[in-house]
Every structure is written in C-alpha cells, then in structure tokens.
Image (cartoon, helix red, strand yellow):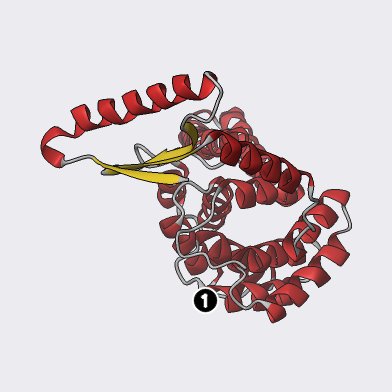
Amino acid sequence: MILYVHRFPETDADAARERFFGSLKTLDRMGRSGGDCERLIAFHHSVDCGFVLTGRGAEVKSIVRTHRRAERVAVAPSPWDEVLEVIRKGDYEAALRSCRRLVKEQPYHRNAYVAGAMLANFLGEHHLAESLASLGARYFPRDGALQYYLGVALLRIEHPDATTTLQRAVELAPDMVSARALLAVQYTLSRRRADALAVLALPEGVEPDDRRASSELERLGHWIRWRRHMFAGGGLLVAMSAVAAAVVGLPGLVPGIVGTGVVAGGWYAFQRQLDAVSSRLRFEEISQGLRRLHRTNPPEKLVS
C-alpha cells in the first residue's frame, strides 16, 4: 500500500486542490481496468493538505473483504446508549438510577448529568436534580443546559437564586427556548415586564434550539402586551367613572364597574396563561431534552 500526501500551499491552494482531485479521478479510472494496477482505497482532505491511500489489486481485495467482515460484527451498546433506550421506553425512574450510577463511574460524563437532572425535575425530585446539576456544573461551568436544569430545580424548591441561575443559563445558551420562557415567566411574576419582553426576543442571528417550542416565546410576548393594554384600558374606565359619578351621580359608576371587570378578567386570564406555559414546559421537557442532547454538545464535553 502507498500513502500520498498532497500539500495545498497558501499561494496556490485552489490549483493544488484541483490537481489533488484530478489525481483521484485518474486512480479511480485505473482501478476500474482490473489487473494488478494501483487502485484508490481511501482519501481525505483538510484545509491545507490531502491524503490518498492506494494499493495493488490483490491488496485492495483483501482490505475490502476484511472491512465487510468488520461491518457485520455487532457492537455492544455503551451504558449511555442503554440510558437513552430506557428513556425512550418511558421508564424514567430506571433511567434516573442509571444516570446516577453513570456519573459515579464516569465523573466527566456531561450528558449523564444533564439527563439525570432533567429526569429528576420531571419526576418531582428537585433536590436530587439540584444535586446532579450542581455537580455537573462544577465539571462544566459554561454549560447552559446544566444551568437551566439547576435553575428549574431551585425554582421548584423556592430557592432565592433560581432567577439568577436561569439568567446565567440564557447567557450561556441564548438559543435555549425553554430557559427563555421560564425566565420570562419569573420576570412577569416579579412585575418586571420590560425584562420579560427583552428575554423573549432572541438576539439577532441566534436560531432557537427548538423551532416548534419557539412559538411559546411569541405567544407569551403577546399575552404580556395584551395584559398591559387590558390594565391600561380598565384603569382608564375607572378614572372616567370617578369623574362621571361626580357629575351625573350613580349612572356614572357604570364605566368603573366595567373597567374593574376588565382588569380582574385580564389578570385572571393572564395568570391562567402563565400556569399553562409552565405546565407545557414541564410536559414537553423530556422530548425537548432528548432533542437537545442529540442536537448539541458543548466543545468542552468529555464523555467516555
């Protein structure tokens, strides 16, 4: 077998790449002619160089047979593959136990921390979720998913650092829709409507990590604006009623009664909407969390 190395100099890189691919085509044509001529086995190219592996007829046939036999050998699933399979089957308690066992055996298994915290939150074991997410965050301090699940756990146990942790999750993972929605709910409950609207708006150039769930951000933003208009309209009717009552007496109280109803109805409807958002986030967390695990892995991840 022969290994050729082709360098792509910065001064004439395009021409060098053309010669590289030209040689591949030549080797491919030669290999089709049969006999003991030189044949292409494999190639790879990077930014500044290319590699070509060739062999003679009998050598190539031996390599192909060996490769095909290797493809037929079954590969045993890893412990992490088994965890994913258990989650897909819906046995979340068993999957959580497997995650806890996995992080003890492999302290740098980022995905096991994330999945374990996600499952513990979903099952209502928020102190366990806090423990898993906190431990994982020590190994991966810039992981937005771990900060998000830690924030969820702290929120459920009414810890004062919950909002701060969710803020950090959004800073580290600005594309995470679930973190933005939950932080916006907390801002709204704290009467920080401007902050809520700001966090619901994805920064320019940032794509949501879940396009289906991103509609939740738009819907929540509409409800916050709608509540502001309802409160303003209801307050205006109450103020008008006070003036009218002073002029025409009891009939002037009618706008005030209507305005009070508008404010109360708007408040009740908005609270129901916030509860619905929180419920949907919890209900869809497993499916969203699995998509998140498959889709993104931080560059500092160390997984055996």
Residue sitting at x 47%, y 72%: 141
- Give the quarter of the image for residue 66: top right
Per the image, label 1 sits on a secondary structure element best described as helix
Residue plotted at (80% across, 69% down): 98
Q: Residue at x 81, y 55 (%)?
A: 87
**Against 142, is 38 above or below?**
above
The image position of residue 121, as x and y in percent, is 73, 64
Q: In the visual, does 203 lie left or right of 209?
A: left
Q: Is residue 189 left or right of residue 117?
A: left
269 on left or right of 220:
right
- Please state the horizontal and vertical placement of residue 300, each as a whole percent of the image: 46, 65
For this orientation, the residue located farthest to the left is 11
Mark 1 residue type: Tyr
Which residue of the protein is positioned furthest toward the front in this rendering? 36
Q: Is residue 175 above or below residue 301?
A: above
Task: Report which residue position mark 1 lands on.
Answer: 139
Q: Quadrant of residue 82?
A: bottom right
Residue plotted at (78% across, 60% down)? 83
Q: Is residue 242 visible?
A: no
Instruction: Give percent across and percent down for residue 169.
Output: 49, 60
Give above or below for 238 relative to 188.
above
Total numbered badges shown on the rendered structure? 1
Q: Is residue 75 above or below residue 132?
A: above
